[in-house]
Structure formats: structure tokens, C-alpha cells
Amino acid sequence: MPKYQTKLVERVEVAEGTMAFGFEQPANFNFTAGQFFTLILPNQPYNDAKGNRRTFSIASPPQVDGHLQIVTRMTGSALKRSLAEVALGTPVEILGPSGAFTLHADTAVPAVFIAGGIGITPFRSMVHDAVARQLPHQIILVYSNRNLEGTAFHDEFRQVAATHRNFKYIPTLTQADKSQRRWEGEQRYVNMDFLREHINDFTKPIFYLAGPPGLVNTIRKAVLEAGVGPRRIQAEEFEGY
Ligand SMILES: Cc1cc2nc3c(=O)[nH]c(=O)nc-3n(C[C@H](O)[C@H](O)[C@H](O)COP(=O)(O)OP(=O)(O)OC[C@H]3O[C@@H](n4cnc5c(N)ncnc54)[C@H](O)[C@@H]3O)c2cc1C
């Protein structure tokens, strides 16, 4: 696995308890939307038994030249506390890119992306990549969170849906009553009924699922129950959550 030296150049809160970190894209580091890398923070100021490396999906699309962004829930682990505090310009190492969680080539086959919480990261890259390359795939994004404050990139996806006929955005908030902002959209968990109501045809799309393993497994069960064969399901489990 190739190892690259780079540095932290951006740090911004993108939702409640959720930070984006940006890194200079090393020369010759080329990736496909949906892939991930392993981040190593040498000499981190905080330490715990879990160490100084983690795997993160790349949340920015390849068209953002010179910049790689990751997005994560701030759980309080030593690595994440360190990332939140070290100076911009701090050197980091990245190993990758890796992974085959990428959009299929056949543009006649629709894609259904289902993200549980922070599982949105590969899809953010894939949606912006599809827009930038004017790919004709039909894409439906189902995005489940507890509340609106914790829903990263909600306004961004609404905007893409408003301007691109091929992209449909279906957010659901399972604890909408705990949102400060008013919510009149979906509030159900992503189960078989939810999917049958929002997706007309289950025979054609490829289903892509991403997020913490517990969530991905629950959603996978619902997709299978809705009648989708396992060969049309791709999953990226964020092991470690
Ligand atoms: C393909 C892939 C893509 C991912 N993409 C993202 C993403 O885009 N955003 C995101 O937030 N997360 C992502 N993750 C998960 C990410 O790698 C972290 O596991 C997660 O963010 C939790 O990290 P933490 O520091 O908050 O949790 P912690 O629980 O503090 O740390 C989790 C890590 O520590 C290890 N660990 C746990 N307990 C111990 C122990 N007792 N001793 C030693 N090691 C231990 C785990 O194996 C794991 O590597 C991804 C994971 C994978 C596999």
C-alpha cells in the first residue's frame, strides 16, 4: 500500500459533533469516488490504546483538485481529540487509496445509496463526482440520522436534488422531536415498508449501504426483505464504530 506524507490544512464543523478535516492532496495520489484511506497522525498530543491510525472514506470528490477531505463524528478518542487541536500544517501520513465501493459503470442501472449517519461520506464524494462528470445514472440517496443538527450536508444534498432530475434525496430523522429546527419529512427507520414506499422498482438498482456495522446490518436486512438479491447489494461497514 503506497504511503504519502501530507499535512492537515482544514478543520471545520459540518454538523453537531461532526468535523471535516482537509489534507493537501499528495502528488500522484489519485482516487475514485467512494474509496478510503488510512490516516496516521505521528506524534499526536493525546494517546490511548487505540493508537494513531484510522480508516476514513474520502468525502470530497476527485474533482476538488489538490484537497482531500474526511468527515467524522467526534467521539473523544485520542486521535480525534488530537486532530481537533493540532495546528493547521501538522504533518500526517496517508495509506491508500483503497476500496471498491464505487459507482457501477452501467449508466442504465440505477443506484440506491443508503447512508446511516456518518456513512454519508463515500456517497458525498460519489454524488458530487456523478454531477461533475454529468453521469446519467438515476441516483436515490436515503440518509438516516437522529436529528437535523447531526445531519451533515443536508442543505447541500437538497440543492443538488433541486437542480438535478436524476438525483432524488430522501432524508429521514428518527428522533425529529429532538431537533431544534422544524421537520416535516420522513421520521421512520429505514425498513422494508419505508423502502417499498420510496423506491418503485426493486428489480434493477444496485443498492449501496454505508455506515457503522450495526446500522448497515439492519438496513441490509430491510433491503433483502424488500426483495433485493444479495448480488445487488454493496456494503461499506465503518468498522471501529
Ligand atoms: C472502510 C472504512 C471507512 C470508514 N470511513 C469512515 C468515515 O468516513 N468517517 C468516520 O468517522 N469513520 C469511518 N470509519 C470508521 C473509522 O475508521 C473509526 O473506526 C471510527 O471513526 C471510530 O473511531 P474512534 O476513534 O471514534 O473510535 P474508537 O473506538 O476510539 O477507535 C476505534 C479504533 O480503535 C480500535 N480499537 C478499539 N478498541 C481497541 C482497544 N481496546 N485496543 C486497541 N485498539 C482498539 C478499533 O479497531 C478501531 O480501529 C471507516 C472505517 C472503515 C473500515
Image (cartoon, helix red, strand yellow):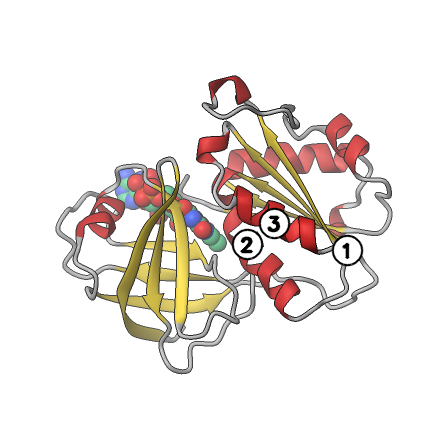
Type of amino acid at the residue the image marks with label 3: Gln
Looking at marks 1 and 2 on the same chain, the residue that comes earlier in the sequence is marked by 2
* Residue sitting at the far top: 177
Whether residue 114 is situated above or below residue 20 in the rendered picture: above
Residue at the image point whose x is 19% and y is 64% from the top: 90
Query: What kind of element bears circle 3?
Result: helix
Q: Residues within 10 Å of mark 3 (few under 14, many from 20)?
A: few
Type of amino acid at the residue the image marks with label 2: Arg
Whether residue 214 is situated above or below residue 106 in the rendered picture: above
Residue at the image point whose x is 55% and y is 54% from the top: 124
Whether residue 234 is situated above or below residue 22 in the rendered picture: above
Judge left or right: residue 102 versus residue 11.
right
Residue 101 makes an appearance in the image: no
* Disc 1 to disc 2, C-alpha distance: 15 Å
Residue at the image point whose x is 87% and y is 47% from the top: 203
Query: What kind of element bears circle 1?
Result: loop
Q: Which residue is mark 1?
A: 138
Q: Which residue is mark 3?
A: 159
Looking at the picture, tell me which residue is in the foreground, 95 or 205. 205
Q: Residues within 10 Å of mark 2 (few under 14, many from 20)?
A: many
Q: Is mark 1 within 8 Å of ligand 1?
A: no
Residue 224's label in the rendered image is none
Q: Nearer the viewer, mark 1 or mark 3?
A: 3
The location of residue 38, given as percent across then percent down, is 37, 61
Q: Is mark 3 within 8 Å of ligand 1?
A: no
Q: Which residue is mark 2?
A: 124
* Disc 1 to disc 3, C-alpha distance: 16 Å
Judge left or right: residue 115 versus residue 203.
left
Looking at marks 2 and 3 on the same chain, the residue that comes earlier in the sequence is marked by 2
